[in-house]
Image (cartoon, rainbow, N blue to C red):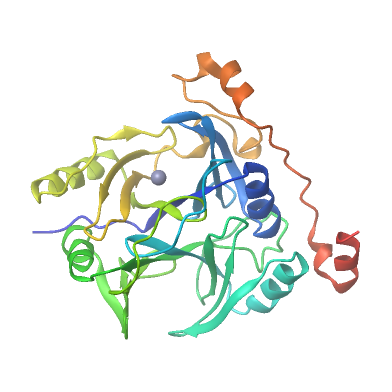
Amino acid sequence: MTIAQPLGMHHVTAIATDPQRNVDFYREVLGLRLVKQTVNYDAPDTYHLYYGDEAGHPGTILTFFPWPNAPRGRRGTGQATTTAFSVPEGSLGYWQQRLRARGVEIIEQATRESDDVLALADPDGLRLELVAHPGDRRAGWPDGPVPVEHAVRGLFGVVLTEGAMEGTDAMLRERLGFQVVEEAPGRTRYGVGDAAPGRVVDVVADPRGQQGLTAAGTVHHIAWRAPDRDIQRAWREALVEAGVTVTPIIDRQYFESIYFREPGGVLLEIATDPPGFTRDEPLLELGRRLRLPPWLEPRREAIEALLPPLKLGELGDDAGDSPAGETDSTQ
Ligand code: ZN
């Protein structure tokens, strides 16, 4: 039997608190483009913010539900505990300086397998990594505040922390078409296709670890790419046949989605590549104003009244990272 295989990661969705602080960090510090301002379709009094490269290509997307009053979550088993972005080889010096200049604490520096890694936390405590990996051919966002030679290329992968490996391992290999590409003590890397950045997931075993609590500063779910609806539908049928509980196909406007849990508890999604973020606004204008799906448009006024207004600050060029510019930027 051939197993459908994702093209790679589609997006990661996490929980934040203050939407303005979230926007400022991901746009101005990490230099991602805000490619969509919309609402959580299941709770339209909350934003759903999407960040990515210029067009928000699948595999570059990190999204947030900012719930201003969400309690702080706890990283632990049954969760995606790290979201890693790919940056060009040789860029970590630049990033160290950039983060330091903006008061972002670097919580770990490591060399893992052959990759250099910087770990940091976003303002809500979400653990992020920047992984310098040679040969990521994705373009990054050429018009962002980070010079394109250092800009984030897209997602590198995620780390799943699991109390037990067996069920997760079986789902990744037997239902999702992953292969083991690297093994280190307590940590296994799985990949699809060429296992390039954006096509890997690491599973860390933590048999005595506490279960994670999904709230602010933690990942809500991770999504893998299906090239189109037909493949997604076939994949759904195969999962159902294998006894996995899967949602119906849900219209998310910019992609269509199915959701299910892996045996360790992490919520997974399979999302289609089309139609993408230019479905309801042109490329040049992505993310500038609130977009609602047709079924919520009649309630726009009420929804806008409930959402805190967002200010998109000017994205300066990167002069702020020269030593003189750093002084300027703190004034
Ligand atoms: Zn999702």
- Which residue is found at the position 26% from the left and 75% from the top? 180
- Which residue is found at the position 79% from the left and 62% from the top? 318
* 162 or 183, nearer to the observer: 162
Q: Where's residue 85, x and y in %?
A: 52, 65
Q: Is residue 141 left or right of residue 247?
A: right
- Which residue is found at the position 24% from the left and 38% from the top? 247
Ligand 1 position by quadrant: top left
* 207 or 106, nearer to the observer: 207
Q: Where's residue 273, x and y in %?
A: 39, 45
Q: Where's residue 324, x and y in %?
A: 91, 70
Q: Is residue 109 above or below residue 223?
A: below
Quadrant of the snapshot with the C terminus: bottom right
- Which residue is found at the position 24% from the left and 35% from the top? 248
| Number of numbered discs visible in the structure rendering | 0
Q: Is residue 5 left or right of residue 156?
A: left
Q: Where's residue 191, x and y in %?
A: 32, 69
Instruction: Give residue 8's quadrant in the image.
Output: bottom left
